[in-house]
Amino acid sequence: MYRRVNSGRFIVLTTAGIVIIMAIFTWVMYGMAQQVNTMTQVMVTLGGDFSRMVILQEDMSADIHSMRQSIETMGQNIVLMNQNIYGMGEDIAVMTGSIQSMNANMSRMTYDISKATYAFSQPLSYMWSTPFGF
């Protein structure tokens, strides 16, 4: 048995087997290392993307805050506009009453102008047709 273990052929086959097994192990480890390297690159890229996403979210938060303030201002302006429109409605009601009064006065003024025109165009006839006869 001792001769067989120490024989050249056994040592060569054993060494070749160990070398083949180590080569397979090295090839498997190399493949795993490539996969780990790929995964590491993906994680680094993902970290950069998260960093950019956080910066964009901060900018977006500032924009949303500004937009909220603009909407609040717009709401206040709409309230003021509603008050102004309500005041305009009241003013239009007053103006309608004034126009009715003006219309009545125009009728009276037209009557007065027609009398004055008649008096100036035919003074003697006007004087004799009045009850006082001026």
Image (spheres, grey):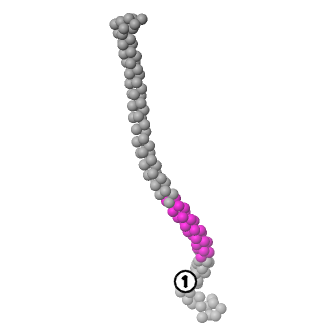
Q: Which residue is mark 1?
A: 117
Dot 1: within a 10 Å radius of its alpha carbon, few (fewer than 14), some, or many (20 or more) residues?
few
Give the residue at x 36% y 16%.
19
Say left or right for 63 vs 81. Answer: left
Asked which secondary structure carries label 1, the reply is helix
Position above or below: 36 against 54: above
Say left or right for 43 vs 78. Answer: left
Position above or below: 40 against 87: above
Say left or right for 43 vs 104. Answer: left
Nearer to the camera, 111 or 88:
88
* Magenta segment main secondary structure: helix
Position above or below: 123 against 66: below
Q: Position of residue 80 (x, y in %)?
A: 55, 67
Whether residue 118 is visible to the viewer of this picture, yes or no, is: no
Give the residue at x 59% y 91%.
127
Whether residue 28 is visible to the viewer of this picture, yes or no, is: yes
Q: Position of residue 105 (x, y in %)?
A: 60, 79
Q: Which image quadrant is residue 39 in?
A: top left
**Farthest residue toward the front?**
2
User: The C terminus appears in which quarter of the rendering?
Assistant: bottom right
Q: Which image quadrant is residue 34 in?
A: top left
Amino acid at pointer 1: Thr
Magenta segment, which residues?
Answer: 70-98
